[in-house]
Image (cartoon, rainbow, N blue to C red):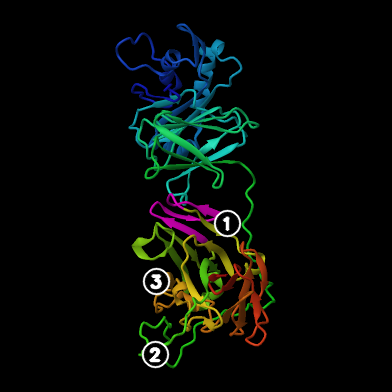
């Protein structure tokens, strides 16, 4: 592979801000020291014909000991750093002017913690570029190992043709955080101008596979022939103005805030009802000649979780709500979780993996493993005052129900209790000193609504005047808020549509 980034250490320099001492040694020094900057540029031309250089590199990054750069910033406001860059650019122009053509000579002086006093290093090459004053960023590059925590790699400028990504800054334009492929692997970005898509190549070509996923708009890089395990996700985004995340409109100061539901002490400890494991003894059925036909059963599936705005529940002491998904992307808790999603008391949504924690900008999609994507959707505007996000569950639990019977869903109802995955104190963190409590107590009534499967859908009845119910269609698009519904005059929910109650987005399937 060609040397795209030349990274060299110079000989010992007594004064690291002395341009002449860095550029060229005084007198003849054939054996006494390593080559200085002028020698390196002369020995490594940008283009040559035979042994004769025809073009010289013109962008150079100079690395000085961090402590000396800091001292200059404190004492002279960086004047010595600026003078050094200008003096080296003048020497460069003077000695190599006939090899520069129309190229601008640019120098950048930065600090490096690993350098001892008197040590100086330089970087130049095909993939070293210094932007002109005021040059805007064309692309931003970020990388991830799990599609959740994305770490910035570096910018790409309109006139920056080659960018090399790799293990560290010694042999690459930008080091990639958590680079998994060792020092021999690299990713080369080729920029042929703003009107041409950025080209992504892997190096060595026979060692890695690179595929673009249009659904996630990122590149997946793996060792050649591998279908799982080690991977690197690379996202290249065209720079654009950042749009603010939509939030619920603030209330006027004169308008009283709606009091959210708060926990009230009860005379007896409240218990969350679960499906009974014991059944009363039944008499043995009598032998008859009747023929039994199978009974059609419908199913209710937990399609998504409606993450609440915890700021509505400050009086309860709730400071964070969290749920994890395992490797099969089914709801999980504790150490079994591959990825977790949390909403805090400021209504910010975060994704959490072993790589760290990152705030999520909605809508978003994650592929923490080689399986289905996990989507986080922006709640419909009609629900934005109550909810922060909709977390779609690729492997949500489901439960069959019998037709012709009326059931109840709520905190105290045993029916569909297995779908209430947040009915655990482990999912809700409260302020210090407060007792643990189930997250279901945020926004879900003891008896929220009734449902009955019929031929043309499900009959829904409101059982609590304070329970908010929302109808979403089969694509999770908002239909309406279910305001008027009773056992005598129920609301008809079509098969395959969703009903939102509390945290739960339930899909009622035929």
Does 421 lie within the magenta span? no
* Circle number at residue 362: 1
- Which residue, as the protein is rendered here, is positioned at the far left? 32
* Circle number at residue 426: 3
Q: Is residue 15 visible?
A: yes
State the image coordinates of residue 238 (x, y, percent, origin top left): 60, 40
User: Above or below — where is 441 with respect to 213?
Assistant: below
Q: Are marks 2 and 1 in contact (CB under 8 Å)?
A: no
- Left or right of 335, for residue 331: right
- Residues 86 and 342: in front is 342
Earlier in the chain: of badge 2 and badge 1, it is 2
Q: Are marks 1 and 3 in contact (CB under 8 Å)?
A: no
* Marks 1/3: CA–CA distance: 25 Å
How crowded pointer 3 is (Cα within 10 Å; few <14, some 14-19, many 20+) is rated as some
Secondary structure under tag 2 reads: loop
- Residues 306 and 319: in front is 306
Residue drawn at 34 percent across, 31 percent down:
117
State the image coordinates of residue 399 (x, y, percent, origin top left): 47, 72
* Circle number at residue 286: 2
């Amino acid at each position: 592979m060609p040397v795209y980034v030349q990274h060299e250490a110079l000989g010992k320099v007594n004064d690291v801000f002395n341009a002449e001492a860095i550029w060229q040694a005084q007198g003849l020094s054939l054996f006494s020291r390593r080559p200085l900057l002028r020698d390196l540029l002369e020995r490594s031309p940008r283009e040559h014909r035979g042994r004769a250089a025809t073009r010289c590199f013109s962008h150079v990054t100079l690395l000085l000991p961090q402590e000396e750069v800091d001292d200059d910033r404190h004492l002279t406001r960086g004047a010595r750093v600026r003078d050094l860059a200008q003096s080296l650019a003048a020497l460069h122009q003077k000695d190599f002017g006939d090899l520069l053509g129309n190229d601008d000579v640019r120098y950048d002086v930065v600090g490096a913690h690993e350098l001892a006093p008197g040590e100086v290093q330089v970087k130049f090459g095909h993939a070293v570029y210094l932007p002109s004053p005021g040059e805007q960023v064309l692309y931003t590059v970020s990388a991830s190992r799990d599609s959740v925590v994305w770490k910035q790699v570096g910018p790409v400028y309109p006139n920056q043709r080659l960018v090399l990504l790799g293990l560290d800054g010694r042999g690459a334009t930008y080091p990639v955080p958590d680079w998994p492929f060792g020092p021999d692997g690299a990713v080369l970005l080729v920029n042929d101008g703003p009107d041409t898509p950025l080209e992504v190549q892997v190096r060595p070509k026979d060692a890695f596979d690179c595929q673009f996923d249009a659904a996630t708009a990122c590149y997946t890089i793996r060792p050649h022939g591998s279908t799982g395990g080690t991977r690197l996700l690379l996202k290249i985004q065209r720079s654009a103005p950042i749009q603010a995340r939509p939030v619920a409109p603030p209330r006027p100061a004169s308008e009283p805030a709606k009091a959210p539901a708060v926990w009230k002490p009860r005379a007896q400890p409240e218990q969350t009802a679960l499906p009974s494991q014991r059944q009363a003894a039944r008499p043995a059925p009598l032998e008859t000649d009747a023929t039994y036909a199978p009974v059609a059963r419908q199913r209710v599936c937990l399609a998504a979780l409606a993450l609440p705005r915890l700021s509505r529940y400050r009086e309860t002491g709730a400071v964070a709500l969290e749920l994890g998904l395992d490797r099969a992307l089914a709801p999980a808790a504790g150490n079994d979780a591959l990825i977790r999603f949390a909403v805090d008391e400021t209504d910010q949504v975060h994704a959490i993996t072993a790589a760290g924690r990152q705030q999520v900008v909605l809508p978003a999609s994650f592929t923490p493993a080689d399986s289905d994507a996990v989507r986080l959707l922006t709640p419909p505007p009609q629900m934005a005052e109550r909810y922060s996000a909709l977390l779609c569950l690729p492997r949500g639990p489901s439960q069959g129900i019998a037709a012709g019977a009326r059931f109840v869903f709520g905190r105290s109802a045993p029916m569909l209790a297995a779908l209430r995955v947040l009915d655990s104190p482990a999912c809700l963190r409260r302020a210090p000193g407060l007792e643990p409590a189930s997250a279901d107590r945020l926004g879900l009534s003891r008896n929220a609504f009734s449902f009955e499967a019929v031929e043309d859908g499900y009959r829904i009845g409101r059982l609590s005047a304070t329970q908010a119910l929302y109808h979403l269609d089969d694509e999770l698009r908002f239909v309406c808020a279910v305001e008027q519904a009773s056992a005598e005059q129920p609301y008809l929910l079509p098969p395959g549509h969703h009903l939102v109650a509390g945290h739960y987005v339930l899909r009622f399937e035929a």
